[in-house]
Image (cartoon, rainbow, N blue to C red):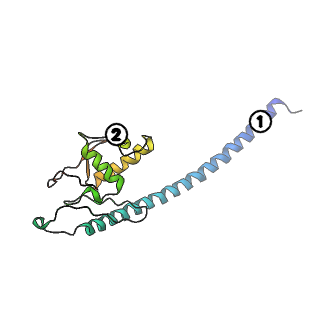
Amino acid sequence: MVSLPEELQAREAAARQRVEELQAEAAELAVRLERARADLSRLEITRETVMEVLAELSAADVAPEVEAHDAPEPRETPVPHGNGVMAVPPWREGLVAGVLPDVYRDIVEIVADAPGPLQAKQIVPRIGLEATTAKIEGTRGKLKRLVERGWLAEDTPGRFTLARHDADVGHVNSR
């Protein structure tokens, strides 16, 4: 029969060996995770660059540069975009919200109709989404993109309004 101290030593040795094995697995997973993060980062940068190029090309196709006194009335023009790519062109004079992908256009219209600044959590139910953390964060990302592209402003962190443009005539043309 094995004594209790010997049994405890054997179990301790087995547990120590299991800990060492798991630490080795964790180290390997950490290396794999870092590689996957690097791949993800490269893909995100590539996607963002492609979206910027598409937005610039779309904006150039939507309305060629003309003299201010020759500018036609703003009109809707769909923005071409590839499969799965939602091109949000940078705002410029004469460009209307109708050129935005549907969800972005809806967000701009909701913000434009609001009496004051809105938070992402207030916009989510108004665009027909369930107010879950994931939907709020996704909408916040879209709001930030609209700010970066000049459609919206974020004067106070997390509170979004329609961007003010010197030549803005105060309308949001949609459908």
Which residue position is annotated with label 1? Answer: 9
Amino acid type shown at disc 1: Gln
Foreground residue, 29 or 60? 60
Foreground residue, 135 or 141? 135
Residue 154 in view of the camera: no
- CA separation, marks 2 and 1? 60 Å
Residue 63 in view of the camera: yes
**Relative to 34, is 148 on the left or the right?**
left
Q: Quadrant of the N terminus?
A: top right
Bin the neighbour count of mark 1 within 10 Å (Cα to Cα): few under 14, some 14-19, many 20 and up: few
Q: Earlier in the sequence, mark 2 or mark 1?
A: 1
- Rendered location of residue 97, percent (x, y): 27, 55
- Rendered location of residue 77, percent (x, y): 27, 64
Amino acid type shown at disc 2: Gln
Which residue position is annotated with label 2? Answer: 122
What label does residue 150 carry, if any?
A: none
